[in-house]
Amino acid sequence: MELSRRGFFKVAGAAGAGVAASRRSAEAWQSRAPADPLGCLVDLTRCIGCRKCEQGCQTVNHLPEPARPFDDLTILDRKRRPDERTFTVINRYFPGRRDERDQLVPTFVKVQCMHCQDPACASACIVGALTKQANGAVHYDVTKCIGCRYCMVACPFEIPAYEYRDPITPRVMKCTFCYERVEKEGKRPGCAEICPVEAITFGRRNTLLTIARNRIKSNPALYVNHIYGEHEAGGTSWLYLSGVPFDRVGFIDVPHRPLTQLAETIQGALFSYLWSPIVLFGMLSGIMYAFRNKGDRDTPEKGGGK
Amino acid sequence: MSAHPAPIRAPFWTPGVLVLAFLMAAGAVAVLARFIGGIGYVSNLSTARPWGIWIGIDVASGVALAAGGFTTAFLAHILGRHYYEPVIRPALLTAMLGYTFVVLGLIVDIGRSWAIWKPMIHWNFHSVLFEVAMCVMFYLNVLYIEFIPIVVERFKGRVNLPGPFAGLNNTVETLLGLADAILPKIMWFFIIAGVVLSCMHQSSLGSLMLIAPTKLHPLWYTPLLPLLFLTSAIAIGYPMVVFETTLATTSLKLDPEMQVLSPLTRFTIFLLGIYLALKIGDMVIRETYVYLLDGTAQTNAFLLELILGVLLPWLMLLSPAVRRSRRWLFIACTLIVGGVLLNRVNVFVVGYRPPVSENYYFPAVTEILITAGFIAGLMFLYRFFVAYFPVLNRPGQEVSA
């Protein structure tokens, strides 16, 4: 192949200069979590499993009518997950505690997007369609989405669902934290507003953490000493209090370090300011130039292969 | 010595090609169904399992198996080992077609296929996938540019468009002449860019799963994922060339090119050795060998991948007799190709365990048909290109080494 040696050298030199200019000390990973977002505290000891929150969610988010009505509590006989038609579901567990008449006491668990402080889905999203808002919501912008579903791979709670049956314009579906209602109308999320027993407290995350700690402190017999979401996945905007250990009522163990940290640290170290491709380009240019005449051998070195 | 590639005139519609055409037709029907009924209509993908074989095979393995393109370009063009020139063009063709089908596979897999261009204007620098997408996009174009000289060689001075297009003959001829005059002077840039872009996204494909520590089985989940993906891609480059050249020269009854392939695989001993050492070292340091005998599907897939796909062929290649034997070299290289393919499938499909749902995934028939159709389409186009473009060496023109 014929190469333009002079042009070659120019670019190689420029590449080297570019490296010198753009290289700087590696920056430690930094959380991009909002300082004091809004959130919700769910107190599992208060929840009575009435499914009003599911209904409120369906109404304010204009979701499709469910196949079975919301007052049909037999649906609790099996475990459900949020899906592309349902942003939140209530599941019933019998963790083993019995009441005075020797009946198993149920614990009801509301499941929805946890609205992580450093959401893995938002870090993963190829186009930035998912973003952590200042008010705490992990917000989905369908106009950017290409449907790669990397957010679903990234989410440690398996929350984002997908409209797999839509051939052309499917959407990622998950709890919106009623972003518009909260941000523009100053209202509470649909589920928190409708809850008849105040199992869902809406407010600033720091305030909610204080409330949660006070509840544990003032009634240590009722609660396990753990606020799920305080540290899980680096912290979430939704927080849970429970009377039974969380692993007995469907909560999974999630690393306390934000899930974004390792991926972003490695990716940043390798590619910030594109230093590595620039260095590699410069090195390869140098090698190519150095070997421009020497390499033109007709036979491979002696030994082995032939 | 220089290669003398030429179009291979052989009967085109052989039984093998008919089988390919049949698979392509079946795949096309399944693709049609996907765009009528949605992804859910043709696949077993779910909330818990958002990525299946389309990502594991069509995309991740497709990218890995196209590594012959940049590894041979590095050897022959950057290190100047022109001795290996005869395998450059077939490797380039495989890479070009491979990446083309990666993009086609993505168009089927992503929900909003028509929005595939959006990452060009909506950038998320934190997203590993964003970097992969940018690199694949640029590299695909680099591959097309690298292929232009072959088109020029075939048509320059012979442009004869059919019927109504005949008026464009001169214009096309001028364009080809222009390409012929400019490209040789700037091709070095694209060759190096191709290697750089490949290193970037081959490694980043591994970084994709770093964000899911609770989902990927510990046998594969390691901070070394990007390095393992890069080294395995580099290691698979030459075996893939052997695999694909042997298939092509056998079915087209051409010179087996053993005098090029045998020495080529000596590099593989070193390159595959690095990958093997990293993989075993990583397992020892993270103490994941404790899983090795637990008998789960994941563990068995890992053992298969490591022993049959890396260790055994590496030991085989150590023997000069294996490297000289066409049959044994092909077997060893096929094992390596299969091993890396299995690795990609393991990382994206087998090793993926949703933490909440007990969700078993096996691809639907239509899902498999689409993947099979794409692979058949790739092979069909390869066959087409070698028949009409100077890619492979014509029999009898082989220059002795």
Image (spheres, coloured by chain):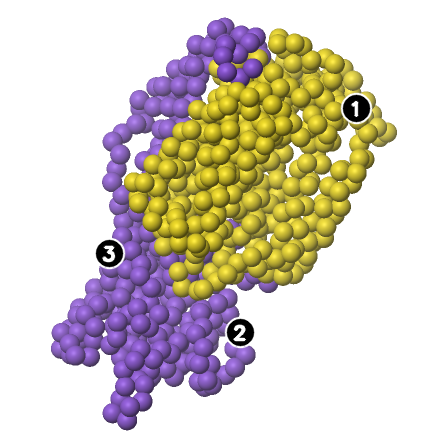
Chain colours: A purple, B yellow
Question: Which residue is pictured at 25% across the width and 31% down the height?
Answer: A25
Nearer the observer, A57 or B264: B264
Instruction: Answer with the quarter of the image where residue A189 lies.
Output: bottom left
**Label 3–label 2 contact, CB within 8 A:** no
Identify the subunit bearing mark 1.
B
Question: Which residue is pictured at 34% across the width and 61% down the height?
Answer: A115
Q: What is the distance, in whole Å, between disc 1 and disc 3 at their CAs?
A: 69 Å
x then y, percent, for residue B196: 46, 27
**Label 1–label 3 contact, CB within 8 A:** no
x then y, percent, for residue B35: 65, 55
In the rendered structure, the answer to whether residue B155 lies left or right of residue B38 reads: right
Check disc 1 and report its element: helix, strand or loop.
loop
x then y, percent, for residue B149: 65, 19
Identify the subunit bearing mark 2.
A
Nearer the observer, B110 or B351: B351
Check disc 2 and report its element: helix, strand or loop.
loop
> Nearer the viewer's eye, disc 1 or disc 3?
1
Along the polypeptide, which appears first: circle 3 or circle 2? 3
Identify the subunit bearing mark 3.
A
From the image, tell me which residue sits under label 2. Answer: A64
Check disc 3 and report its element: helix, strand or loop.
loop
From the image, tell me which residue sits under label 1. Answer: B9
User: How many residues crowd around disc 2 within 10 Å: few (fewer than 14), some, or many (20 or more)?
Assistant: few
Nearer the observer, B75 or A43: B75
Q: What is the distance, in whole Å, between disc 3 and disc 2 at their CAs?
A: 35 Å
Type of the residue with mark 3: Ala
Type of the residue with mark 1: Arg
From the image, tell me which residue sits under label 3. Answer: A35
Labels 3 and 2 share a subunit: yes
